[in-house]
Image (cartoon, rainbow, N blue to C red):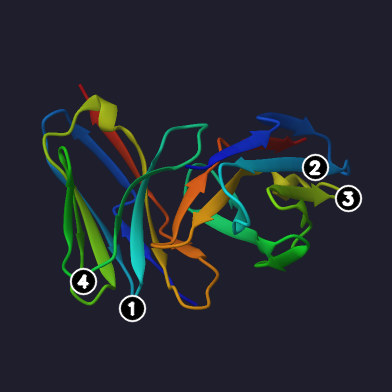
Amino acid sequence: TQLLEQSPQFLSIQEGENLTVYCNSSSVFSSLQWYRQEPGEGPVLLVTVVTGGEVKKLKRLTFQFGDARKDSSLHITAAQPGDTGLYLCAGAAGGTSYGKLTFGQGTILTVHP
Amino acid sequence: SQTIHQWPATLVQPVGSPLSLECTVEGTSNPNLYWYRQAAGRGLQLLFYSVGIGQISSEVPQNLSASRPQDRQFILSSKKLLLSDSGFYLCACLEEWPYEQYFGPGTRLTVT
């Protein structure tokens, strides 16, 4: 069974601060996704990384996939109140796994103005 | 791109009553579909997935069942709800590579 350990579980910061969320596993993933979810809504896909060592940027968000494709990080620069939400990482084993994803437990981010 | 619909958006049901949640998908054909439950805004637990009409795989033993009567319709059911069935239920559709899943808006179920 694949597991994804996501940390920290909670982050409460002031507007303008930087932060990093981590997802770690002992398993190798074919791809890894990051989602953001607002209360009462479904998760929205932010980015997918597929190559070991890959770095993707989405405005103030930087996503990195570990060289061994077992871990990933999300870094937010100069956080804003609009970044508040639940961030989820999810990994796909690929192959014959029918596209099933293993989700981390999530990071609840609160950015105070 | 696909669009996923779920209804109802919210539901309050007494213990012991039946349940039927519906998910429909537009903009794709023969998708893999998934039902998740999310407790208290945390990680998602996969309940069922389906790779085609009439094909259902269960991930965890529980009080729920799923069916896929049509290509783009996925239904989550229960004959008798338990208090522990309360939660936020999400339906998702797979984009084959790189295995991205897209989610519906969810159904908030409260069992009283």
Q: Residues within 10 Å of mark 3 (few under 14, many from 20)?
A: few
Residue under numbered circle 4: A52
Rendered image: mark on residue A26: 1
As rendered, which of B87 and A90 lies closer to the eye? Answer: A90
Seen in the image, is A73 located left or right of residue B50?
Answer: left
Measured Cα–Cα span from mark 3 to mark 2: 9 Å
Which amino acid type is shown beneath numbered disc 3? Lys
Measured Cα–Cα span from mark 1 to mark 4: 15 Å
Residue under numbered circle 2: B20
Rendered image: mark on residue A75: none
Measured Cα–Cα span from mark 2 to mark 1: 38 Å
For marks 1 and 4, the one nearer the N-term is 1
Evaluate whether label 2 is on the same chain as label 1: no
| Badge 4 element | loop
Which amino acid type is shown beneath numbered disc 2? Ser
The image quadrant of residue B11 is: top right
Evaluate whether label 3 is on the same chain as label 2: yes
Evaluate whether label 2 is on the same chain as label 4: no
Residue under numbered circle 3: B79
The image quadrant of residue A61 is: top left
For marks 3 and 2, the one nearer the N-term is 2
Residue occupying image coordinates x 47% and y 42%? B1
| Badge 1 element | loop
Measured Cα–Cα span from mark 3 to mark 1: 39 Å
- The chain that hosts pointer 2 is B
Which amino acid type is shown beneath numbered disc 4? Gly
The reply to whether dot 2 and dot 1 touch (C-beta < 8 Å) is: no
**Marks 3 and 4: which is nearer the front?**
4
